[in-house]
Amino acid sequence: MPSGTPSSYVSDFPSDRELRFSTAWLATEAIQSLLARGGLKLSADITCILREGGRKSFTGQVTRIERVLGLKHTFYVTYRGGKEISVGGRTARVEDARLLQVKLRPYS
């Protein structure tokens, strides 16, 4: 890329392959983009640190997001027996877990 050329912002994420993220804000952007297309569902393999302590890895269904630009980037995952967990970023304070890594798998 030539010097002085602005970088481009990715806002259209591919729905035909697995996506991996280690930041909640980018994962939330991808989730919002994919769910807005309608007809797509998202399975997620998540590794996180729980608010009450300890590391957890699990697979679940992404159900929704909550976003306040620059402040909060949270997504919610339902897993085993209908339990829901909120996953946030590095500064997660009100979420159930802080994201370490997520693998998203879109499907119809």
Image (tube, rainbow, N blue to C red):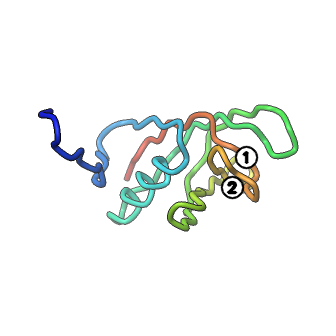
Residue 75, position in %: x, y? 59, 56
User: Disc 2 marks which amino acid?
Assistant: Ser
Viewer-proximal residue among 49 and 82? 49
Identify the residue under disc 1.
97
Residue 25, position in %: x, y? 51, 51
How many numbered marks are there? 2
Q: For mark 2, give the secondary structure.
A: strand
Up-down: is 60 above or below 101? below
Q: For mark 1, give the secondary structure.
A: strand
Q: Are marks 2 and 1 in contact (CB under 8 Å)?
A: yes
Residue at 86 percent across and 38 percent down: it is 53
Viewer-proximal residue among 79 and 90? 90
Residue 34, position in %: x, y? 37, 56
Identify the residue under disc 2.
86
User: Disc 1 marks which amino acid?
Assistant: Ala
Residue at 33 percent across and 37 percent down: it is 17
Viewer-proximal residue among 51 and 80? 51
Q: How far apart are the two marked residues, 2 and 1, measured between alpha carbons?
A: 6 Å
